Image (cartoon, rainbow, N blue to C red):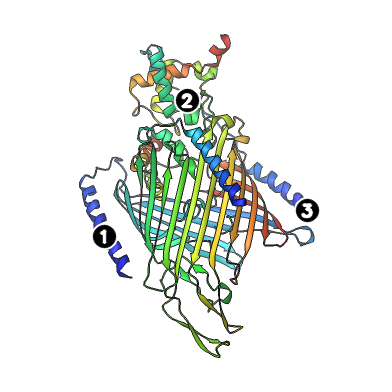
Amino acid sequence: MKTTKTITPLIACSLLLFAFVHQTDVWKAPESAKAKKNPVAITEASMAIGAKLYVKECLSCHGKKGRGDGPKASDIEKPVTDLSIAKTQAQTDGELFWKISEGRKPMPANKKIFSEEQLWQLVNYIRSFDKTIVKSK
Amino acid sequence: MKKRIVLSAIITAMGMLFAINGCVSTRVAEKSGSELWSDNCIRCHNAPASSVYSPDQWEAVAMHMRIRVGLTEVETKKIMEFLKAGN
Amino acid sequence: MNMKTFTLLTTLFAISSSLWAQNTSTEETNSSGNSGDTKFVLTGYGYSGMTIEGKGKEQKSTFGETGFAPIFIWKASKNLFFEGEVEFILLGEGLDIELEYANVNLIMNKYMTLRAGKFLSPFGTFQEKLHPAWINKMVSKPLGFGHGAVGPDAEIGFDLRGGVPLGSSKMNYSLYVSNGPILRTGVEEENEAGMLEYGNIVDNNKNKAIGGRIGFLPFSNSSLEIGVSAQTAKGGNNDSIFFYNKKNNAMDALEYNNIGTKSYALDLSYVKSLAFIKGTLDIKGQLNNVTVDKADYADLIDSTKYSFKNVTQSYYVQLAYRPNMLRNKFFNKTELVGRYSALKSPEESKWGEEETQLTIGLNYWASWRSVIKFNYQITQNGGNESEPAILIQFVTGF
């Protein structure tokens, strides 16, 4: 009994200690990048390549369906972006292209890893996560 | 008796592991830095985000981990490049 | 040092120096540009906790073991590396300072690294890779895996190690020559006759310990690792021990210079993030076995000598699950852990005991290397009543 009495406040205090608030700041792509047109058409073949690249480089944080719930997401202090929500999907292809290329700590800059074509294929694949499209079907 | 139970439990567990992983046959050398980071760090501890250390520090940490765990040279390089790219 | 070890060491050096020479000739230039070549990191971990032991009236609680372990890591050049760890622990009597390891490493080629100095024994995986408080998922260490463990915990000597890719599998190895264990004869501490002491700075004989470990990872996702370790050494002193033997009514001499020790360990680790359980499964286990040749020890109180079968064994199995793929920001940082461990030391020795322990834990990961652990632990010693304990620990790596 006495033990429980000592432990309960201890647990409560420790949990409070470790509860911290995340602050998110807006990440904006430059206007020139926003307007950039996507030259890669959505075909089965290009989507398959995009999927493969996604699994290799993005999945561990962004998760299988892009919801920001990959196996590594819970240990990253910044919340991992949910790629399926309207806020992400409302961005232009050019904006997504720029963000994947440049990265923002702790997300890696991918322009050295991927070719331009591969980056566009990734953008196309990320479009398949769009929740709003699934709902309207 | 007790030993037999433990032994059969181990064999069953191993069988299950092979069943789960049986379809995985990619060569380790073809894996990306992101995948290797995701697979290897958690063998002992949670995987650190790239922002934890500076690119220079990652070089020292990668060498420390390569020697401690016996990561291959290629794996170490890819993981290090992945973590440096996130800075 | 005997001839065999000398030859082994010289061969090792010969191979290593030639391989290094090849490697340096193709050295790349440093690509990181604006910074110096020496990369340094000061890392480590600190911890503190609380222990509540016993039942009913006999219950006591104490703010427990507190420690701090800075780790210094230098990458001096492309091939040269140094690592050192000092551990400061507040124990019963006061502050305990220990040099956990300090070694110089030379990466000779893709597959070989030679290191010299004090290093954690590659005997299984717990001591070398899993014991730091921020990595160990429990507050306590498994029975027979703490300080004074079953089997070697640290070596002073040379070690050759590396990782080798094997297509969709890979392996790693470690092979070392070190001072090895010293056999306690009971002259200084009577109750410790037949025990082994590890991590010796000065050896008590010319024999060197030879040991190593091979780890095999069959799957390309590195989820499973199976390891086998072994060490062989002579532990005895060159000097004889004289004592009065009542049975013969005369002085008797006991010799230990030929007493050999053989140790082996088996280890297993399976860690995998599985989407269908929304989390990461972590299974670990290790078995340690130490056999010391049969020897006579003096019982100075009874003035007789005695002998026993000197085999010590300990093992642990641990299962952990963390639902880290849940979207709930609180639950994806929690982890459930269960561990069972057992220790059996020689029954007829003066330090023999049989203990088992069950630990159940709940962890909360505040960051990737900061954790609060809540453990409930039941220890059973021989036929005695079981001892329950509650252990709480705060740890942070830095």
Q: Label 1 to label 3, Cα distance in Å? A: 65 Å
Give me the chain letter of mark 1.
C
Give me the chain letter of mark 2.
A
- Tag 3: amino acid: Lys
Give the left or right position of residue C364, taking residue C157 as reference. Answer: right
Q: Which mark is residue C208?
A: none
Give me the chain letter of mark 3.
A
Q: Nearer the viewer, mark 3 or mark 2?
A: 3
Q: Residue at x 35, y 25 (%)?
A: A114
Location of mark 3 (residue): A2
Quarter holding the N terminus of chain C is bottom left
* Residue at mark 1 shares a chain with residue at mark 2: no
Q: Residues within 10 Å of mark 1 (few under 14, many from 20)?
A: few
- Tag 2: amino acid: Trp
In this view, which residue lies farthest toward the bottom? C249
Location of mark 1 (residue): C11
Q: Residues within 10 Å of mark 2 (few under 14, many from 20)?
A: few
* Residue at mark 3 shares a chain with residue at mark 2: yes
Q: Residue at x 38, y 42 (%)?
A: C170
Location of mark 2 (residue): A27
Assess whether mark 3 and mark 1 are in contact (beta carbons under 8 angstroms): no
Give the SS element for disc 2. Answer: loop
Q: Residue C390: percent from the left, percent from the top?
A: 69, 53
Q: Residue at x 36, y 44 (%)?
A: B59
Q: Nearer the viewer, mark 1 or mark 3?
A: 1
Q: Label 3 to label 2, Cα distance in Å? A: 51 Å
Q: Nearer the viewer, mark 1 or mark 2?
A: 1
- Tag 1: amino acid: Thr
Q: Label 1 to label 2, Cα distance in Å? A: 59 Å
Q: Is residue C328 above or below residue A132?
A: below
Q: Residue at x 57, y 49 (%)?
A: C317
